[in-house]
Amino acid sequence: MRGRFITFEGIDGSGKSTQLAATASALRAGGIDVLQTREPGGTQLGEALRSMLLQRRMSPLTETLLMFAARVEHIDEVIVPALGTGHWVLCDRFTDATYAYQWGGRGIAQEWIASLESWSHPTLQPDLTVVVDLEPQQAALRRAREREPDRFEAQDAAFFARVREVYLARARAEPNRFLVVDGSRPGPQIVTQILERVKPWRA
């Protein structure tokens, strides 16, 4: 029986990684086999590309192509095999992030990203995409408290406002796939909201 594919999205500092980990723990406590992974990353090649993407300066198009290169390896080596064995795959970012960051943030043409998506995973889409939504100013304060910024996190508030708007627009366009949660709420409340959404799949 195929597992469920759940992706977590949001601007840097929104708390999406924290909510992914908490949701994974709650699902495991309920007896579900869960695989946690991330993009870019998840494979040996993907992690090497992640390091380059987060630290090295490059053109927006190069950035986009490398994101999809890492994604193809991740899908083939990790995501599809895990789903095939019945695991629920919880992934920190997926293709929605490319639309948000490379189209919304960098200005790469939306149709180019759509073409790469159709070549890279024509039949695979998340069963659920959780967008942890937070105002860019609040997210910036969180990032400043927690870590030194990488190449993406160092972008200005206008960049993150564009990224956020793409996430919210995609959620409005596909309400059956997306769940938008308020990233300023207490973590346990967010996890409860996510678990309620996936409750029918656990029956």
Image (cartoon, rainbow, N blue to C red):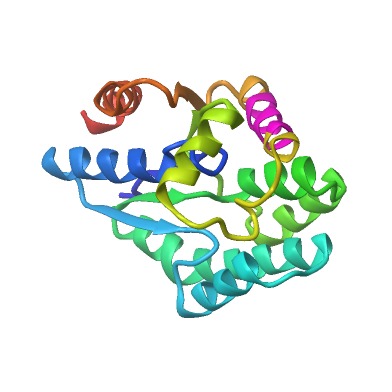
Looking at the image, can residue 4 be seen?
Answer: yes
Q: Is residue 118 magenta?
A: no
Q: Does the magenta stretch include residue 168?
A: yes
Dominant secondary structure (helix, strand or loop) of the stretch shown in magenta: helix
Foreground residue among 112 and 152: 152
Left or right of 3 on screen, residue 106: right
Q: How many labels does the image show?
A: 0
Looking at the image, is 116 positioned above or below residue 187? Answer: below
Looking at the image, is 30 positioned above or below residue 193? Answer: below
Task: Name which quarter of the figure residue 192 lies in.
Answer: top left
Looking at the image, is 147 positioned above or below residue 193? Answer: below
Bounds of the magenta segment:
161-170
Foreground residue among 23 and 139: 139
Residue at 45% x, 23% y: name it.
181
Residue at 62% x, 69% y: name it.
55
Residue at 73% x, 40% y: name it.
159
Query: At which x and y percent is residue 201?
Result: 30, 31
Query: At which x and y percent is residue 175?
Result: 57, 21
Left or right of 9 on screen, residue 24: left
Q: Quadrant of the C terminus?
A: top left
